[in-house]
Image (spheres, helix red, strand yellow):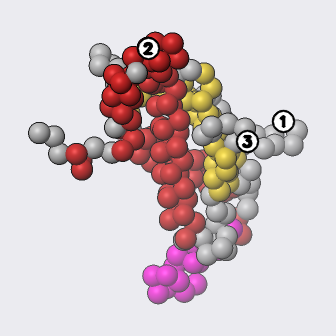
């Protein structure tokens, strides 16, 4: 017998629906209540779940990262915002650069870097990151949904860790590339003071 405490409530919904359909089979046929077995619906639900889990990871990473900034005294904090009028889309923002994570099409989660600019100026550090990158949903043989990047299976925590790291590096590079030598000197001085050395 299975150990029920190992099964999440969100993973048990199908059994309740199956039992209700067994009690009222005519109602199920008329109302098409068995939609949770429809692969299209499963992909849609998985997309929202994946996006929400990604956002949770980004929020956790931003909270920990921002704790080191001392209220933006040491560096600009990372902000995570919801995208209005969407189920789970969000963006990450720092130093005029944003990483937008959206459900761009059925079974597609798109990650794209963008920079707020005035005129045609753009940071060299971001030029290689301007393209969109997609995660694709795949339906397995037993209607299980998994997500892939370039054909390889991925998990939300892997994706969040990689893109959060890339995002913070890109925004740090964008800030440093503005030619502000005083900022660099202040950072070196702070590191030396932390190690007990003084200029």
Report whether residue 153 is seen.
no
* Residue that appears at 47% across and 87% down: 196
* Residue that appears at 67% across and 36% down: 86
* Residue that appears at 54% across and 63% down: 63
In the image: residue 125, left or right of residue 191 = right
In the image: residue 20, left or right of residue 87 = left
Residue 120's disc number: 1
**Circle 3 SS class:** loop
Number of numbered discs:
3
> First in sequence: mark 3 or mark 2?
2
Q: Residues within 10 Å of mark 2 (few under 14, many from 20)?
A: few
In this rendered view, identify the residue nearer to me: 46 or 111: 46
Q: CA distance from mark 3 to mark 2?
A: 40 Å
Single out the residue that lies furthest toward the right: 119
CB-based contact (under 8 Å), mark 1 and mark 3 = no
Q: Residues within 10 Å of mark 1 (few under 14, many from 20)?
A: few
Which residue in the protein does label 2 denote? 26
Residue 84's disc number: 3
- Callout in the foreground (1, 2): 2
Q: Tell me which secondary structure the magenta stretch mostly adopts.
A: helix
What is the span of residues highlighted in magenta in the rendered image? Answer: 183-199
In this rendered view, identify the residue nearer to me: 161 or 177: 161
Residue 146's disc number: none
Picture quarter with the C terminus? bottom right
Q: CA distance from mark 1 to mark 2?
A: 62 Å
> First in sequence: mark 1 or mark 2?
2
């Amino acid at each position: 017998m299975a150990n029920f405490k190992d099964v999440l409530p969100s993973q048990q919904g199908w059994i309740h629906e199956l039992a209700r359909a067994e009690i009222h089979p005519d109602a199920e046929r008329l109302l098409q209540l068995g939609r949770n077995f429809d692969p299209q619906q499963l992909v849609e639900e998985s997309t929202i779940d994946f996006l929400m889990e990604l956002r949770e990871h980004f929020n956790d990473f931003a909270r920990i990262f921002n704790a080191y900034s001392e209220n933006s005294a040491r560096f600009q904090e990372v902000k995570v915002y919801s995208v209005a009028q969407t189920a789970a889309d969000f963006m990450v923002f720092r130093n005029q650069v944003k990483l937008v994570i959206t459900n761009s099409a059925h079974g597609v989660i798109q990650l794209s870097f963008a920079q707020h600019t005035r005129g045609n100026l753009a940071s060299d550090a971001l030029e290689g990151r301007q393209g969109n990158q997609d995660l694709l949903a795949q339906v397995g043989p037993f209607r299980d949904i998994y997500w892939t990047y370039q054909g390889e299976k991925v998990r939300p925590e892997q994706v969040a860790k990689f893109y959060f790291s890339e995002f913070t590096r890109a925004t740090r590079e964008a800030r440093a590339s503005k030619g502000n030598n005083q900022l660099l000197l202040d950072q070196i001085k702070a590191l030396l003071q932390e190690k007990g050395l003084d200029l």
